Image (spheres, rainbow, N blue to C red):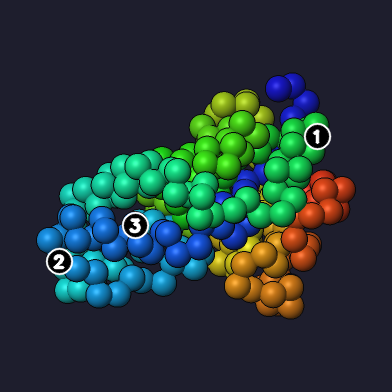
Amino acid sequence: MAGVRTLVLWDVDHTLLSIGDLSGQIYAEVFEDVTGRPMQQLADMTGRTDRAIITATLRLHGIEPTEDLVVRFATALGRAFDARRADLAARGKELPGARAALAALTRQPVIQSLLTGNMEPIARCKLAAFCLGEFVDFSVGAYGLDDAERPPLVRLARKRAEAKYEQPFDEYSTVLIGDTPLDVTAGHEGGARVVAVATGASDSDELRSAGAEIVLADLTDTGAVVRAVLRATQR
C-alpha cells in the first residue's frame, strides 16, 4: 500500500453501529456462567474497554478481578457474542452512512482500522454481523483487552501500523473517529487528531467542548466525512 499517509481508527459502538441493550444481556449471562451468581449491576460501559468493564463489574459484586478471572470472563464473553451473531444483525443496526463512509475512505490514501473498547473477537463479530469488516485492517487496530484505558490503545495501534506498513504515524497522520468525550481524550493523549460524530449519547456541543478537531452530526454526508478525515491531519 505504497503512498498511504493516514491511519484512520474507528470506534465501533454508536459510531459505526448499535446493538441496543444486547451487550448488557450478554454480559449478564456470562457473568452468571463464570461466577455462579446473578449479575446485580453492570459497570458503566460508555467509552470504556471490555477489560475495564469486566474488572469494574466484578468489583461491584465484591469479587477480586484476578487476571485469570478476567481472561476467563473475556473468553466466555467472546464466545457468547459469536453465538449471538444472528441476534446482533436482527436486533442491531448499522448507523446511517457508515458503510458509505468506510467504502469512500478505501479510495483515499488511508489505512482503516479500529480503536475500540471491544475485545478483538467481539469487534470482528459485530462488524461481520453487518458486513463491514471488509473495509478495515483488523491486524493494526487496538482493542478492549489490550489495556484498561483508551489512550494507550492509540499508541499501540500506531505501533502496529508502523510495523506492518513501514512508515511512521504521528498525530498528524493518525485520525480517530468516535462518538464520546472519552474518544476525544484518548485521541489527544494517544497522539491522534479526532473527528467526533454526535451519534451516541454526547451532542455536538459536548464533543466540541471536549476538544475534537472536527465534529459531525453523523456519517450521512459521505463527502463531509472524507473531507473531515483529510482536513484533520493538516498542520
Alpha-carbon neighbours of circle 3 within 10 Å: few (<14), some, or many (≥20)? Answer: some
Instruction: Please identify, in this view, whether the residue under mark 1 or under mark 2 is nearer the observer.
Output: 2
- CB of mark 2 within 8 Å of CB of mark 3? no
Instruction: Please identify, in this view, whether the residue under mark 1 or under mark 3 is nearer the observer.
Output: 3
Whole-Å distance between the Cαs marked 2 and 3? 14 Å
Task: Answer with the quarter of the image where residue 49 lies.
Answer: bottom left
- Image coordinates for residue 46, horizontal then vertical, percent: 49, 68
Query: What amino acid is at disc 1?
Result: Gln
Disc 2 is placed on an element classified as loop
Residue topped by disc 2: 37
Residue topped by disc 1: 108
At 48% from the left and 49% from the top, the residue drawn is 88
Query: What amino acid is at disc 3?
Result: Ile
Disc 1 is placed on an element classified as loop
Compared to residue 110, the image places residue 65 above or below, namely below
Disc 3 is placed on an element classified as helix
Residue topped by disc 3: 26
**Which of disc 3 and disc 2 is earlier in sequence?**
3
Whole-Å distance between the Cαs marked 1 and 3? 37 Å
